[in-house]
Image: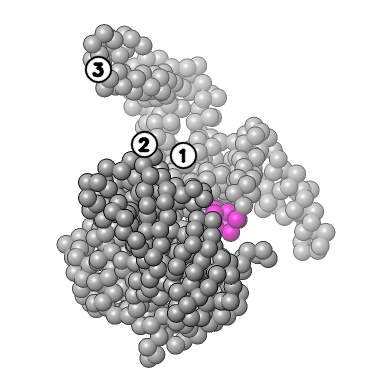
């Protein structure tokens, strides 16, 4: 057995003549890896998932699952299992019958079937619900049945399509931990599609950021958050301030960028393209409101537009004279900062090491 | 209306009336209209039919009384019992035939027709026969199935048969055939609607878990369309029990079903006998309906 769960090789999917849903995508998903696809709607993440499961056939390219070419196989001919957003449980079957369905299709004997189903229900913590009807279950319980039903078939890869989308916020957090635990316990690759980045970052080993059918960046959550590869990722991921400008000089990995809002110093990657037009990116949590004349590498002045209270931090939105605006997250701010209100003039600063130059 | 509401223990509106009481009153008024309608036009006739069935028959009508003569006559006359048996035989043939014909149609419209508009048009097509009267629906078969009808002309034209086929019209098969076609909307409709209610993801889930298209059909789609099947069978069975025109125009009057006996007695002004047939008709239908409800919990599924 290969240690790669899924190989996508130059996979392209077109719908009709005009719509290019996925564009020459190449991606290798390791066994036991938890990988998430995020991106705006229509970016091709769901189409990619459906091509792995076999519900969509690629227009070009190859899909290997556990080393076997599955590009043109039907969904029931490949060893994948899917968890659906609306659970898609069989309403005319009990919990146990739902979980046993995949085993029944694989011609597993009745005794082994019920034993494996029970073990799996225990693993997702609902063994006492085995004989219940689906209609009697809560949303969270239904999601657990969905997980058990998929995992019990020992798939090469578990595909999760917005699996937590229809759960309320608290339950979603609990199920995130549950998903992470199941991924570790079973050692099966999980491919998770979501439009909620916090969810993707919470559970994943690697995150795939997609846009217009292409991969913009792949990497661990820390990496895509801290080192966005381009303007799209910087705009899409996390809470970033983005200021346009032109590179006027580079010295020791630090570029000097001049734009309408001022001149800033920011890190620049060694392999950065030889272009002048660029954007300076700095995360809202790495910018500070300066009350005491501190002098970090970069500073701007502006007016407080509004602030948003978020339990442990306050987000200040500052309007700059250039028309740009900057968001500053102040973690547990002192009273002098917490009291700032609309119209107050403030200075905002950040260090060159915390800022990054990206290109379109 | 107010009198009725009061008689059911709902107080007349007063200044201190609470919102819930107001809502209850509204609900009661909404229920009252259909209840009164049903009582007037269904309840009273039904009760009078039962009462008349025990009246004494008389050459030109009936006389009040309480006799079992009408029922005794029905259950001791061989022709009537044969008719009862024949009615059920036709039902046993027509219902499965209709399921076999209508299920694929519903399946096709539901899963293969992509455009919602086209789906609507196809379903509307099933209702077209109901734009005209029952009589015309029957008579319309004659140019098609008759001795010199289109089908015989074609069959003879291409040399498959030499003589016009007699079986096409005025025969039991032609009766069964036309019943199945004319009532198809009662079967296609409910099956289609319960099929359309199935979550597409549920079907995908089955495929994903290793079920072939065939297995998915039998293990997922058929069980989930049981309510539609049951409703369709119920509709057709009830319509069939009351049908008398098809036997006359397409069956050629050679074979009679239960409703024909009723019409015949009524035509002879034998009201008590006709009423007794009607009561028998309702009574024999009840077990069938109960059976269908055993098969599927319509209240829960619909």
Q: Is residue A162 above or below residue B266?
A: below
Q: Viewed as shown, does residue B71 lie left or right of B261?
A: left
Q: Position of residue A40 (x, y in %)?
A: 49, 60
Mark 1 or 3, closer to the camera: 3
Spatial CA span between label 2 and label 3:
46 Å
The residue pinned by badge 1 equals B238
Mark 2 element type? helix
Q: Which residue is mark 3?
A: B18
**Tag 2 residue:** B283
User: In the shown orientation, is residue A185 left or right of residue A346?
Assistant: left
Quadrant in which the C terminus of chain A is drawn: bottom right
What whole-number distance in Å separates the C-alpha atoms at marks 1 and 2?
12 Å
SS at badge 1: helix
Residue drawn at x 37%, y 52% as measured from the top left: A347
Q: Position of residue B273 (x, y in %)?
A: 44, 27
Spot the residue most to the left: A128
Secondary structure beneath dot 3 equals: loop
Q: Chain of mark 2?
A: B
Q: Quadrant of the N terminus of chain A?
A: bottom left
Image: magenta residue range: B106-114
Instruction: Please report whichever mark, 2 or 3, sits nearer to the chain's N-terminal start.
Output: 3
Viewer-proximal residue among B111 and B227: B111
- The quarter of the picture where residue A353 lies is bottom left
Closer-to-camera residue (A63/B229)? A63
Identify whether B238 is placed above or below A186. above
């Amino acid at each position: 057995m290969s240690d790669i769960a899924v190989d996508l090789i130059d996979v392209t999917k077109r719908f009709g003549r005009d719509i290019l849903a996925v564009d020459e995508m190449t991606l290798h998903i390791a066994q036991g890896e938890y990988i998430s696809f995020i991106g705006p709607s229509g970016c091709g993440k769901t189409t990619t998932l459906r091509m792995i499961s076999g519900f969509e056939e690629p227009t070009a390219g190859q899909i290997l699952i556990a080393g076997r070419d599955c590009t043109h196989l039907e969904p029931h001919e490949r060893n994948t299992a899917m968890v659906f957003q609306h659970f898609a449980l069989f309403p005319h079957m009990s919990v146990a019958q739902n979980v046993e369905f995949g085993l029944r299709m694989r011609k597993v004997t009745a005794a082994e079937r019920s034993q494996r189903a029970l073990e799996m229900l225990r693993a997702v913590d609902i063994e006492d619900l085995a004989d219940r009807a689906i209609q009697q279950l809560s949303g969270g319980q239904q999601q657990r049945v969905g997980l058990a039903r998929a995992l019990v078939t020992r798939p090469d890869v578990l595909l999760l399509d917005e699996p937590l989308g229809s759960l309320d916020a608290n339950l979603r957090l609990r199920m995130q931990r549950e998903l992470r635990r199941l991924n570790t316990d079973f050692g099966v690759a999980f491919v998770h599609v979501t439009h909620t980045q916090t969810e993707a970052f919470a559970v994943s080993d690697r995150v795939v950021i997609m846009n217009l059918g292409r991969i913009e960046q792949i990497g661990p959550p820390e990496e895509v958050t801290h080192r966005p590869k381009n303007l799209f990722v910087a705009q899409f991921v996390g809470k970033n301030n983005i200021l346009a400008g032109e590179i006027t000089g580079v010295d020791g990995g630090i570029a000097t960028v001049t734009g309408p809002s001022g001149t800033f110093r920011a890190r620049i990657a060694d392999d950065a393209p030889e272009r002048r037009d660029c954007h300076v990116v700095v995360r809202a949590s790495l910018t500070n409101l300066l009350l005491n004349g501190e002098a970090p590498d970069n500073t701007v002045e502006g007016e407080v537009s509004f602030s948003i209270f978020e339990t442990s931090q306050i987000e200040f939105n500052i309007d700059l004279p250039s028309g740009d605006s900057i968001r500053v997250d102040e973690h547990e701010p002192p009273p002098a900062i917490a009291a700032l209100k609309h119209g107050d003039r403030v200075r905002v600063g950040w260090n060159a090491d915390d800022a990054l130059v990206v290109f379109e | 209306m107010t009198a009725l509401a009061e008689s059911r223990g709902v107080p007349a509106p007063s200044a201190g009336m609470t919102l819930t009481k107001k809502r209850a009153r509204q609900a009661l008024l909404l229920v009252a209209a259909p209840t009164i309608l049903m009582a007037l036009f269904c309840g009273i006739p039904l009760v009078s039919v039962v009462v008349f069935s025990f009246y004494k028959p008389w050459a030109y009508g009936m006389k009040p009384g309480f006799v079992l003569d009408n029922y005794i006559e029905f259950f001791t006359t061989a022709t009537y019992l044969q008719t009862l048996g024949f009615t059920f035989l036709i039902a046993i043939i027509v219902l499965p035939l209709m399921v076999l014909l209508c299920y694929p149609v519903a399946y096709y419209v539901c899963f293969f027709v992509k455009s919602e508009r086209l789906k609507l048009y196809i379903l509307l097509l099933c209702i077209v026969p109901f734009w005209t009267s029952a009589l015309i629906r029957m008579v319309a078969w004659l140019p098609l199935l008759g001795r010199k009808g289109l089908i015989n002309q074609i069959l003879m034209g291409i040399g498959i048969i030499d003589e016009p086929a007699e079986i096409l019209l005025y025969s039991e098969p032609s009766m069964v055939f036309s019943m199945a076609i004319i009532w198809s909307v009662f079967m296609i409709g409910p099956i289609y609607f319960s099929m359309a209610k199935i979550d597409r993801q549920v079907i995908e889930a089955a495929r994903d878990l290793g079920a072939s298209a065939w297995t998915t059909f039998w293990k997922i789609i058929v069980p989930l369309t049981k309510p539609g099947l049951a409703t369709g069978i119920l509709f057709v069975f009830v319509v069939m029990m009351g049908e008398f025109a098809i036997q006359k125009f397409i069956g050629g009057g050679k074979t009679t079903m239960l409703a024909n006996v009723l019409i015949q007695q009524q035509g002879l002004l034998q009201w008590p006998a006709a009423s007794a047939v009607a009561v028998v008709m309702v009574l024999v239908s009840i077990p069938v309906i109960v059976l269908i409800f055993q098969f599927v919990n319509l209240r829960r599924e619909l």
